[in-house]
Protein backbone atom coordinates (compact mmCIF):
# COMPACT_ATOMS: atom_id res chain seq x y z
CA UNK A 1 0.00 0.00 0.00
CA UNK A 2 0.81 3.64 -0.04
CA UNK A 3 -0.04 6.73 1.92
CA UNK A 4 0.27 10.15 0.31
CA UNK A 5 -1.07 13.40 1.66
CA UNK A 6 -1.12 17.01 0.51
CA UNK A 7 -2.35 19.95 2.54
CA UNK A 8 -3.11 23.44 1.37
CA UNK A 9 -2.91 26.31 3.84
CA UNK A 10 -2.77 30.04 3.21
CA UNK A 11 1.01 30.18 3.40
CA UNK A 12 1.66 27.28 1.05
CA UNK A 13 1.51 23.57 0.40
CA UNK A 14 2.78 20.51 2.23
CA UNK A 15 3.28 17.10 0.65
CA UNK A 16 4.27 13.81 2.22
CA UNK A 17 4.49 10.25 0.97
CA UNK A 18 5.82 6.90 2.10
CA UNK A 19 8.07 4.66 0.00
CA UNK A 20 6.89 1.10 0.44
CA UNK A 21 5.87 -0.85 -2.63
CA UNK A 22 4.77 -4.40 -2.60
CA UNK A 23 3.67 -6.98 -5.09
CA UNK A 24 2.92 -9.84 -2.73
CA UNK A 25 4.26 -10.04 0.77
CA UNK A 26 7.69 -11.29 -0.29
CA UNK A 27 8.29 -8.64 -2.91
CA UNK A 28 8.58 -5.46 -0.92
CA UNK A 29 10.63 -2.63 -2.34
CA UNK A 30 11.35 1.01 -1.72
CA UNK A 31 10.30 3.57 -4.31
CA UNK A 32 9.69 7.23 -3.77
CA UNK A 33 6.11 8.12 -4.60
CA UNK A 34 6.91 11.81 -4.88
CA UNK A 35 8.15 13.57 -8.00
CA UNK A 36 8.83 17.24 -8.45
CA UNK A 37 8.83 19.31 -11.60
CA UNK A 38 9.47 23.01 -11.91
CA UNK A 39 10.99 26.06 -13.51
CA UNK A 40 12.09 28.69 -11.05
CA UNK A 41 10.10 31.90 -11.19
CA UNK A 42 7.49 30.34 -13.50
CA UNK A 43 5.88 27.24 -11.99
CA UNK A 44 6.40 24.40 -9.51
CA UNK A 45 4.67 21.01 -9.21
CA UNK A 46 4.77 18.08 -6.82
CA UNK A 47 3.18 14.80 -7.93
CA UNK A 48 2.27 12.04 -5.44
CA UNK A 49 1.25 8.63 -6.74
CA UNK A 50 -0.57 5.54 -5.48
CA UNK A 51 -1.51 2.35 -7.24
CA UNK A 52 0.13 0.18 -9.86
CA UNK A 53 3.85 0.95 -9.95
CA UNK A 54 4.22 0.30 -13.68
CA UNK A 55 1.42 2.77 -14.37
CA UNK A 56 2.76 5.47 -12.05
CA UNK A 57 6.32 5.09 -13.39
CA UNK A 58 4.96 5.21 -16.93
CA UNK A 59 3.06 8.41 -16.15
CA UNK A 60 6.11 10.07 -14.57
CA UNK A 61 8.30 9.06 -17.52
CA UNK A 62 5.78 10.59 -19.94
CA UNK A 63 5.56 13.81 -17.93
CA UNK A 64 9.35 14.09 -17.93
CA UNK A 65 9.64 13.27 -21.64
CA UNK A 66 6.98 15.80 -22.65
CA UNK A 67 8.93 18.49 -20.81
CA UNK A 68 12.35 17.38 -22.06
CA UNK A 69 11.30 17.13 -25.67
CA UNK A 70 9.35 20.38 -25.55
CA UNK A 71 5.97 18.90 -26.49
CA UNK A 72 3.06 21.25 -27.03
CA UNK A 73 1.30 19.81 -23.96
CA UNK A 74 3.49 19.43 -20.91
CA UNK A 75 3.58 20.54 -17.29
CA UNK A 76 5.68 23.47 -18.55
CA UNK A 77 3.04 24.64 -21.04
CA UNK A 78 -0.28 24.05 -19.23
CA UNK A 79 -2.06 27.33 -18.49
CA UNK A 80 -3.42 26.53 -15.02
CA UNK A 81 -3.59 23.81 -12.35
CA UNK A 82 -6.89 22.39 -13.63
CA UNK A 83 -5.46 21.97 -17.12
CA UNK A 84 -2.38 20.40 -15.50
CA UNK A 85 -4.57 17.89 -13.64
CA UNK A 86 -6.52 17.08 -16.82
CA UNK A 87 -3.26 16.54 -18.67
CA UNK A 88 -1.91 14.16 -15.99
CA UNK A 89 -5.31 12.41 -15.86
CA UNK A 90 -5.26 11.84 -19.63
CA UNK A 91 -1.76 10.37 -19.49
CA UNK A 92 -2.78 8.16 -16.58
CA UNK A 93 -5.83 6.85 -18.51
CA UNK A 94 -3.63 6.24 -21.51
CA UNK A 95 -1.08 4.26 -19.47
CA UNK A 96 -3.79 2.17 -17.82
CA UNK A 97 -5.54 1.23 -21.06
CA UNK A 98 -2.26 0.19 -22.70
CA UNK A 99 -1.86 -2.44 -20.04
CA UNK A 100 -4.44 -5.15 -20.43
CA UNK A 101 -4.23 -8.43 -18.59
CA UNK A 102 -6.50 -11.08 -17.19
CA UNK A 103 -8.28 -9.49 -14.27
CA UNK A 104 -5.30 -7.49 -13.09
CA UNK A 105 -5.96 -3.86 -12.33
CA UNK A 106 -3.44 -1.25 -13.37
CA UNK A 107 -5.18 1.66 -11.70
CA UNK A 108 -3.35 4.61 -10.24
CA UNK A 109 -4.34 7.76 -8.39
CA UNK A 110 -2.35 10.95 -8.13
CA UNK A 111 -2.21 14.14 -6.14
CA UNK A 112 -0.87 17.05 -8.15
CA UNK A 113 -0.06 20.23 -6.31
CA UNK A 114 1.80 23.37 -7.13
CA UNK A 115 1.58 26.87 -8.42
CA UNK A 116 1.65 28.45 -11.87
CA UNK A 117 2.63 32.11 -12.20
CA UNK A 118 0.32 34.46 -10.33
CA UNK A 119 -2.40 31.86 -9.73
CA UNK A 120 -2.85 30.76 -6.13
CA UNK A 121 -1.24 27.42 -5.17
CA UNK A 122 -3.59 24.45 -5.48
CA UNK A 123 -3.74 20.71 -4.86
CA UNK A 124 -5.81 18.24 -6.89
CA UNK A 125 -6.66 14.58 -6.53
CA UNK A 126 -6.66 12.78 -9.89
CA UNK A 127 -8.77 9.62 -9.92
CA UNK A 128 -7.92 6.50 -11.93
CA UNK A 129 -10.67 7.57 -14.35
CA UNK A 130 -8.68 10.72 -15.13
CA UNK A 131 -11.03 13.30 -13.59
CA UNK A 132 -10.04 15.34 -10.56
CA UNK A 133 -11.18 17.29 -7.52
CA UNK A 134 -9.39 20.13 -5.77
CA UNK A 135 -9.07 20.91 -2.08
CA UNK A 136 -10.92 23.85 -0.56
CA UNK A 137 -10.79 26.05 2.52
CA UNK A 138 -13.15 23.69 4.33
CA UNK A 139 -11.36 20.54 3.13
CA UNK A 140 -7.76 21.74 3.03
CA UNK A 141 -6.15 18.34 2.47
CA UNK A 142 -6.24 15.42 0.03
CA UNK A 143 -5.12 11.84 0.58
CA UNK A 144 -4.51 8.81 -1.63
CA UNK A 145 -3.78 5.21 -0.67
CA UNK A 146 -4.25 4.01 2.90
CA UNK A 147 -5.95 7.18 4.04
CA UNK A 148 -8.18 6.31 6.98
CA UNK A 149 -5.73 5.72 9.85
CA UNK A 150 -4.18 9.16 9.40
CA UNK A 151 -7.41 11.11 8.83
CA UNK A 152 -8.66 11.83 12.40
CA UNK A 153 -5.63 13.97 13.29
CA UNK A 154 -5.97 15.97 10.06
CA UNK A 155 -9.65 16.59 10.75
CA UNK A 156 -8.78 17.93 14.18
CA UNK A 157 -5.72 20.06 13.39
CA UNK A 158 -5.47 21.33 9.82
CA UNK A 159 -7.44 24.30 8.55
CA UNK A 160 -6.65 27.08 6.09
CA UNK A 161 -5.05 29.23 8.79
CA UNK A 162 -2.67 26.54 10.06
CA UNK A 163 0.93 27.62 9.55
CA UNK A 164 3.04 25.78 6.99
CA UNK A 165 5.28 24.37 9.72
CA UNK A 166 2.31 23.14 11.78
CA UNK A 167 0.74 21.62 8.67
CA UNK A 168 4.02 19.79 7.96
CA UNK A 169 4.16 18.53 11.56
CA UNK A 170 0.56 17.36 11.30
CA UNK A 171 1.32 15.59 8.03
CA UNK A 172 4.22 13.74 9.69
CA UNK A 173 2.01 12.72 12.63
CA UNK A 174 -0.67 11.51 10.22
CA UNK A 175 2.00 9.48 8.38
CA UNK A 176 3.30 8.07 11.66
CA UNK A 177 -0.18 6.91 12.74
CA UNK A 178 -0.65 5.23 9.37
CA UNK A 179 2.72 3.45 9.51
CA UNK A 180 1.95 2.23 12.99
CA UNK A 181 -1.40 0.72 12.01
CA UNK A 182 -0.47 -0.63 8.57
CA UNK A 183 2.86 -2.35 7.95
CA UNK A 184 2.53 -1.94 4.20
CA UNK A 185 3.10 1.80 4.59
CA UNK A 186 6.76 2.44 5.41
CA UNK A 187 9.75 4.77 5.40
CA UNK A 188 11.62 6.58 4.04
CA UNK A 189 9.13 9.43 4.15
CA UNK A 190 9.38 12.24 1.65
CA UNK A 191 8.31 15.68 2.82
CA UNK A 192 8.09 18.80 0.69
CA UNK A 193 7.17 22.24 1.97
CA UNK A 194 6.31 24.77 -0.72
CA UNK A 195 5.92 28.44 0.20
CA UNK A 196 3.07 30.22 -1.61
CA UNK A 197 4.30 32.67 -4.22
CA UNK A 198 7.92 31.53 -4.10
CA UNK A 199 7.79 29.67 -7.43
CA UNK A 200 10.96 27.94 -6.27
CA UNK A 201 11.26 24.22 -5.57
CA UNK A 202 10.03 23.52 -2.06
CA UNK A 203 12.25 22.24 0.71
CA UNK A 204 12.45 18.48 0.19
CA UNK A 205 13.57 16.19 2.99
CA UNK A 206 13.71 12.41 3.04
CA UNK A 207 13.28 10.99 6.55
CA UNK A 208 14.55 7.48 7.13
CA UNK A 209 13.36 5.16 9.84
CA UNK A 210 16.39 6.13 11.92
CA UNK A 211 15.92 9.89 11.52
CA UNK A 212 16.57 11.33 15.00
CA UNK A 213 13.95 14.02 14.39
CA UNK A 214 11.31 11.49 13.32
CA UNK A 215 12.06 9.37 16.40
CA UNK A 216 11.77 12.43 18.66
CA UNK A 217 8.50 13.41 16.97
CA UNK A 218 7.02 9.91 17.37
CA UNK A 219 8.05 9.74 20.99
CA UNK A 220 6.70 13.19 21.78
CA UNK A 221 3.39 12.40 20.06
CA UNK A 222 3.09 9.09 21.86
CA UNK A 223 3.77 10.77 25.21
CA UNK A 224 1.35 13.56 24.37
CA UNK A 225 -1.40 11.09 23.49
CA UNK A 226 -0.78 9.12 26.65
CA UNK A 227 -1.00 12.34 28.67
CA UNK A 228 -4.17 13.44 26.85
CA UNK A 229 -5.57 10.03 27.68
CA UNK A 230 -4.58 10.27 31.35
CA UNK A 231 -6.29 13.65 31.58
CA UNK A 232 -9.63 12.40 30.29
CA UNK A 233 -12.52 12.81 32.70
CA UNK A 234 -12.79 9.51 34.60
CA UNK A 235 -15.41 7.12 33.33
CA UNK A 236 -18.66 8.34 34.82
CA UNK A 237 -21.33 5.93 33.76
CA UNK A 238 -23.83 7.25 36.26
CA UNK A 239 -24.02 10.57 34.44
CA UNK A 240 -23.26 9.28 30.97
CA UNK A 241 -26.61 8.25 29.61
CA UNK A 242 -29.47 5.87 29.83
CA UNK A 243 -28.72 2.76 31.89
CA UNK A 244 -30.07 -0.42 30.45
CA UNK A 245 -30.71 -3.46 32.55
CA UNK A 246 -30.19 -6.56 30.46
CA UNK A 247 -32.19 -5.18 27.55
CA UNK A 248 -32.22 -8.21 25.37
CA UNK A 249 -31.26 -10.69 28.01
CA UNK A 250 -33.31 -13.82 27.83
CA UNK A 251 -33.55 -15.56 31.14
CA UNK A 252 -35.57 -18.65 31.80
CA UNK B 1 -21.79 1.80 8.06
CA UNK B 2 -21.15 0.54 11.51
CA UNK B 3 -18.38 0.58 14.05
CA UNK B 4 -18.23 -2.07 16.74
CA UNK B 5 -15.33 -2.78 19.04
CA UNK B 6 -14.60 -5.28 21.80
CA UNK B 7 -11.54 -5.25 24.03
CA UNK B 8 -10.31 -7.96 26.33
CA UNK B 9 -8.17 -7.02 29.32
CA UNK B 10 -7.27 -9.05 32.39
CA UNK B 11 -10.08 -7.60 34.48
CA UNK B 12 -12.82 -8.10 31.92
CA UNK B 13 -14.37 -7.16 28.62
CA UNK B 14 -15.50 -3.90 27.06
CA UNK B 15 -17.93 -3.62 24.16
CA UNK B 16 -19.06 -0.59 22.23
CA UNK B 17 -21.15 -0.06 19.12
CA UNK B 18 -22.81 2.76 17.23
CA UNK B 19 -26.44 2.76 16.08
CA UNK B 20 -26.56 4.19 12.59
CA UNK B 21 -28.02 2.07 9.83
CA UNK B 22 -28.42 3.18 6.29
CA UNK B 23 -29.75 1.80 3.09
CA UNK B 24 -28.97 4.67 0.77
CA UNK B 25 -28.30 8.17 1.98
CA UNK B 26 -31.97 9.05 2.51
CA UNK B 27 -32.84 5.97 4.50
CA UNK B 28 -30.92 6.39 7.71
CA UNK B 29 -32.22 4.75 10.85
CA UNK B 30 -31.16 4.01 14.37
CA UNK B 31 -30.76 0.41 15.46
CA UNK B 32 -28.72 -0.88 18.31
CA UNK B 33 -26.03 -3.23 17.06
CA UNK B 34 -25.47 -4.72 20.50
CA UNK B 35 -27.43 -7.61 21.97
CA UNK B 36 -26.88 -9.27 25.31
CA UNK B 37 -27.76 -12.78 26.42
CA UNK B 38 -27.10 -14.34 29.77
CA UNK B 39 -28.02 -16.40 32.78
CA UNK B 40 -26.66 -15.06 36.03
CA UNK B 41 -24.04 -17.25 37.67
CA UNK B 42 -23.75 -19.44 34.57
CA UNK B 43 -22.83 -17.45 31.44
CA UNK B 44 -22.98 -14.03 29.83
CA UNK B 45 -22.68 -12.97 26.19
CA UNK B 46 -22.57 -9.73 24.26
CA UNK B 47 -23.08 -9.86 20.49
CA UNK B 48 -22.07 -6.96 18.21
CA UNK B 49 -23.16 -6.98 14.58
CA UNK B 50 -22.20 -5.31 11.32
CA UNK B 51 -23.49 -5.77 7.81
CA UNK B 52 -26.89 -6.46 6.32
CA UNK B 53 -29.57 -5.52 8.84
CA UNK B 54 -32.02 -8.22 7.75
CA UNK B 55 -29.30 -10.84 8.25
CA UNK B 56 -28.20 -9.55 11.65
CA UNK B 57 -31.79 -9.23 12.88
CA UNK B 58 -32.51 -12.72 11.60
CA UNK B 59 -29.49 -14.08 13.45
CA UNK B 60 -30.45 -12.37 16.71
CA UNK B 61 -34.04 -13.61 16.42
CA UNK B 62 -32.77 -17.17 15.92
CA UNK B 63 -30.40 -16.93 18.89
CA UNK B 64 -33.27 -15.67 21.07
CA UNK B 65 -35.70 -18.33 19.79
CA UNK B 66 -33.25 -21.18 20.36
CA UNK B 67 -32.85 -20.08 23.98
CA UNK B 68 -36.56 -19.41 24.53
CA UNK B 69 -37.69 -22.71 23.08
CA UNK B 70 -34.93 -24.65 24.82
CA UNK B 71 -33.32 -26.03 21.67
CA UNK B 72 -30.49 -28.51 22.02
CA UNK B 73 -28.05 -26.00 20.55
CA UNK B 74 -28.33 -22.50 21.94
CA UNK B 75 -26.15 -19.91 23.63
CA UNK B 76 -27.38 -21.42 26.91
CA UNK B 77 -26.18 -24.94 26.04
CA UNK B 78 -22.87 -24.39 24.21
CA UNK B 79 -19.94 -25.77 26.18
CA UNK B 80 -17.37 -23.04 25.52
CA UNK B 81 -16.84 -19.75 23.69
CA UNK B 82 -15.43 -21.40 20.56
CA UNK B 83 -18.49 -23.61 20.24
CA UNK B 84 -20.62 -20.52 20.82
CA UNK B 85 -18.86 -18.70 17.98
CA UNK B 86 -19.24 -21.71 15.66
CA UNK B 87 -22.95 -21.85 16.52
CA UNK B 88 -23.47 -18.14 15.75
CA UNK B 89 -21.38 -18.53 12.58
CA UNK B 90 -23.55 -21.42 11.37
CA UNK B 91 -26.75 -19.43 11.96
CA UNK B 92 -25.23 -16.43 10.16
CA UNK B 93 -24.32 -18.60 7.15
CA UNK B 94 -27.80 -20.06 7.15
CA UNK B 95 -29.44 -16.61 7.20
CA UNK B 96 -27.21 -15.34 4.40
CA UNK B 97 -27.87 -18.28 2.08
CA UNK B 98 -31.64 -18.03 2.54
CA UNK B 99 -31.52 -14.58 1.10
CA UNK B 100 -30.65 -14.68 -2.56
CA UNK B 101 -31.05 -11.71 -4.83
CA UNK B 102 -29.51 -10.23 -7.94
CA UNK B 103 -26.05 -9.10 -6.96
CA UNK B 104 -27.05 -7.85 -3.51
CA UNK B 105 -24.85 -8.98 -0.67
CA UNK B 106 -26.42 -10.06 2.59
CA UNK B 107 -23.17 -10.51 4.46
CA UNK B 108 -22.80 -9.87 8.16
CA UNK B 109 -19.94 -9.99 10.67
CA UNK B 110 -20.23 -10.40 14.40
CA UNK B 111 -18.17 -10.02 17.53
CA UNK B 112 -19.22 -12.42 20.24
CA UNK B 113 -17.78 -11.95 23.68
CA UNK B 114 -18.52 -13.26 27.09
CA UNK B 115 -17.77 -15.89 29.66
CA UNK B 116 -19.03 -19.39 30.34
CA UNK B 117 -18.65 -20.85 33.83
CA UNK B 118 -15.06 -21.09 34.97
CA UNK B 119 -13.55 -20.49 31.54
CA UNK B 120 -11.75 -17.19 31.11
CA UNK B 121 -13.70 -14.42 29.32
CA UNK B 122 -13.08 -14.26 25.57
CA UNK B 123 -13.98 -12.24 22.50
CA UNK B 124 -14.27 -13.64 18.96
CA UNK B 125 -14.76 -12.11 15.54
CA UNK B 126 -17.11 -14.17 13.38
CA UNK B 127 -16.61 -13.65 9.64
CA UNK B 128 -19.44 -13.71 7.07
CA UNK B 129 -18.15 -17.17 6.08
CA UNK B 130 -18.96 -18.41 9.59
CA UNK B 131 -15.43 -19.05 10.83
CA UNK B 132 -13.92 -17.02 13.64
CA UNK B 133 -10.76 -15.70 15.30
CA UNK B 134 -10.24 -14.79 18.93
CA UNK B 135 -8.32 -11.91 20.48
CA UNK B 136 -5.04 -12.53 22.28
CA UNK B 137 -2.77 -10.84 24.79
CA UNK B 138 -0.85 -9.18 21.97
CA UNK B 139 -3.99 -8.23 20.04
CA UNK B 140 -6.44 -7.52 22.85
CA UNK B 141 -9.20 -5.99 20.73
CA UNK B 142 -11.41 -6.84 17.76
CA UNK B 143 -13.27 -4.50 15.44
CA UNK B 144 -15.97 -4.84 12.79
CA UNK B 145 -17.33 -2.28 10.34
CA UNK B 146 -15.56 1.02 9.81
CA UNK B 147 -12.52 0.05 11.83
CA UNK B 148 -9.58 2.08 10.53
CA UNK B 149 -10.23 5.59 11.87
CA UNK B 150 -10.43 4.34 15.44
CA UNK B 151 -7.51 1.90 15.31
CA UNK B 152 -4.45 4.12 15.98
CA UNK B 153 -5.60 5.06 19.48
CA UNK B 154 -6.28 1.40 20.35
CA UNK B 155 -2.82 0.41 19.12
CA UNK B 156 -1.27 3.02 21.37
CA UNK B 157 -3.30 2.57 24.54
CA UNK B 158 -4.88 -0.87 25.03
CA UNK B 159 -2.93 -3.88 26.26
CA UNK B 160 -3.82 -6.80 28.49
CA UNK B 161 -2.92 -4.87 31.65
CA UNK B 162 -5.08 -1.84 30.87
CA UNK B 163 -7.78 -1.43 33.51
CA UNK B 164 -11.38 -2.05 32.55
CA UNK B 165 -12.22 1.64 33.07
CA UNK B 166 -9.30 2.79 30.92
CA UNK B 167 -10.22 0.28 28.23
CA UNK B 168 -13.79 1.62 28.24
CA UNK B 169 -12.50 5.19 27.97
CA UNK B 170 -10.23 4.18 25.09
CA UNK B 171 -13.15 2.47 23.36
CA UNK B 172 -15.21 5.66 23.63
CA UNK B 173 -12.35 7.75 22.23
CA UNK B 174 -11.94 5.28 19.36
CA UNK B 175 -15.68 5.55 18.67
CA UNK B 176 -15.52 9.35 18.81
CA UNK B 177 -12.65 9.49 16.28
CA UNK B 178 -14.62 7.22 13.97
CA UNK B 179 -17.81 9.27 14.23
CA UNK B 180 -15.86 12.43 13.50
CA UNK B 181 -14.28 11.04 10.34
CA UNK B 182 -17.25 9.06 8.99
CA UNK B 183 -20.79 10.45 9.14
CA UNK B 184 -22.29 7.01 8.56
CA UNK B 185 -21.23 6.00 12.08
CA UNK B 186 -23.42 7.72 14.64
CA UNK B 187 -24.94 7.82 18.12
CA UNK B 188 -26.43 6.61 20.33
CA UNK B 189 -23.43 4.61 21.44
CA UNK B 190 -23.90 1.43 23.43
CA UNK B 191 -21.24 0.59 25.99
CA UNK B 192 -21.05 -2.56 28.05
CA UNK B 193 -18.45 -3.27 30.71
CA UNK B 194 -18.25 -6.87 31.84
CA UNK B 195 -16.17 -7.79 34.90
CA UNK B 196 -14.25 -11.06 34.55
CA UNK B 197 -15.66 -13.82 36.73
CA UNK B 198 -18.84 -11.95 37.67
CA UNK B 199 -21.11 -14.01 35.38
CA UNK B 200 -23.60 -11.17 35.77
CA UNK B 201 -24.79 -8.91 32.96
CA UNK B 202 -22.30 -6.14 32.46
CA UNK B 203 -23.06 -2.51 33.07
CA UNK B 204 -24.83 -1.29 29.93
CA UNK B 205 -25.07 2.41 29.14
CA UNK B 206 -26.51 4.09 26.06
CA UNK B 207 -24.87 7.44 25.35
CA UNK B 208 -26.80 9.84 23.18
CA UNK B 209 -25.32 12.64 21.16
CA UNK B 210 -26.27 15.08 23.94
CA UNK B 211 -24.78 12.99 26.76
CA UNK B 212 -22.99 15.52 28.99
CA UNK B 213 -20.29 12.97 29.77
CA UNK B 214 -19.69 12.20 26.10
CA UNK B 215 -19.46 15.90 25.33
CA UNK B 216 -16.97 16.40 28.17
CA UNK B 217 -14.94 13.42 26.99
CA UNK B 218 -14.84 14.68 23.39
CA UNK B 219 -13.83 18.15 24.50
CA UNK B 220 -11.15 16.87 26.84
CA UNK B 221 -9.72 14.59 24.14
CA UNK B 222 -9.76 17.37 21.57
CA UNK B 223 -7.97 19.71 24.00
CA UNK B 224 -5.51 16.96 24.92
CA UNK B 225 -4.70 16.28 21.29
CA UNK B 226 -4.26 19.98 20.59
CA UNK B 227 -1.91 20.22 23.56
CA UNK B 228 0.03 17.12 22.50
CA UNK B 229 0.32 18.74 19.09
CA UNK B 230 1.52 22.06 20.53
CA UNK B 231 4.19 20.23 22.52
CA UNK B 232 5.67 18.46 19.50
CA UNK B 233 9.31 19.29 18.83
CA UNK B 234 9.34 22.18 16.33
CA UNK B 235 9.87 21.15 12.74
CA UNK B 236 13.62 20.74 12.38
CA UNK B 237 14.27 19.91 8.78
CA UNK B 238 17.99 20.57 9.09
CA UNK B 239 18.42 17.59 11.39
CA UNK B 240 15.59 15.49 10.02
CA UNK B 241 17.11 13.59 7.16
CA UNK B 242 18.60 13.77 3.72
CA UNK B 243 17.95 17.05 1.93
CA UNK B 244 17.12 16.69 -1.70
CA UNK B 245 17.59 19.48 -4.16
CA UNK B 246 15.01 19.21 -6.90
CA UNK B 247 15.61 15.49 -7.39
CA UNK B 248 13.38 14.92 -10.36
CA UNK B 249 13.11 18.52 -11.43
CA UNK B 250 13.49 18.92 -15.14
CA UNK B 251 14.78 22.37 -16.05
CA UNK B 252 15.52 23.46 -19.53
Image: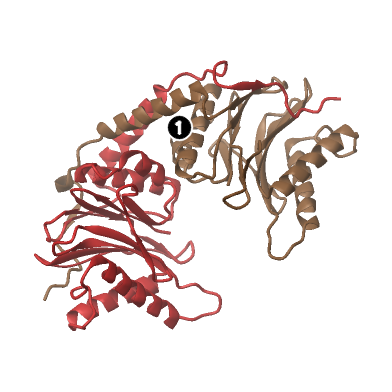
Chain colours: A brown, B red
Q: Nearer the viewer, residue A100 or A67?
A: A100
Question: As displayed, is residue B82 above or below residue A209?
Answer: below
Q: Which residue is tagged 1?
A: A157
Quadrant of the image containing the N terminus of chain B = bottom left
- A130 on left or right of B2: right
Q: Tell me what residue is drawn at x 52 percent, y 24 percent.
A: A211
Front residue of this view, candidates B103 and A30: A30
Rendering coords of residue B172 (x, y %): 29, 46
Q: Which corner quadrant of the image does residue B157 belong to?
A: top left
Residue at 32% x, 72% y is B86
The answer to whether residue B41 is left or right of residue A99 is left
How many marks the image carries: the answer is 1
* Chain of the residue on which disc 1 is drawn: A
Quadrant into which the C terminus of chain B falls: top right
Of residues A182 and B194, which is closer to you in this image? A182
Q: Nearer the viewer, residue B187 or B238?
A: B238
x and y, in percent, of residue A222 in the image: 37, 31
Q: Residue at x 46, y 38 (%)?
A: A177
Residue extending farthest to the top is: B238
How far across and down, in percent of the image, does residue B251 sit? 82, 25
Determine the secondary structure under disc 1.
helix
Residue A122, image x and y in percent?
Answer: 66, 34
Quarter-of-image position of residue B56: bottom left
Amino acid sequence: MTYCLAAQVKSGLVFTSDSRTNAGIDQVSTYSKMHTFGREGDRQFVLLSAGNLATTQGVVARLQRDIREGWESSLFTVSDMHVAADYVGAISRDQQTRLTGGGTTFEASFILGGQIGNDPPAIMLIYPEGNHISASDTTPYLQIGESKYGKPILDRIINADTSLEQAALCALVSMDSTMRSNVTVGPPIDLVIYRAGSLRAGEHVRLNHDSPYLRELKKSWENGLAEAFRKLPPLNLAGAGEHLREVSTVSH
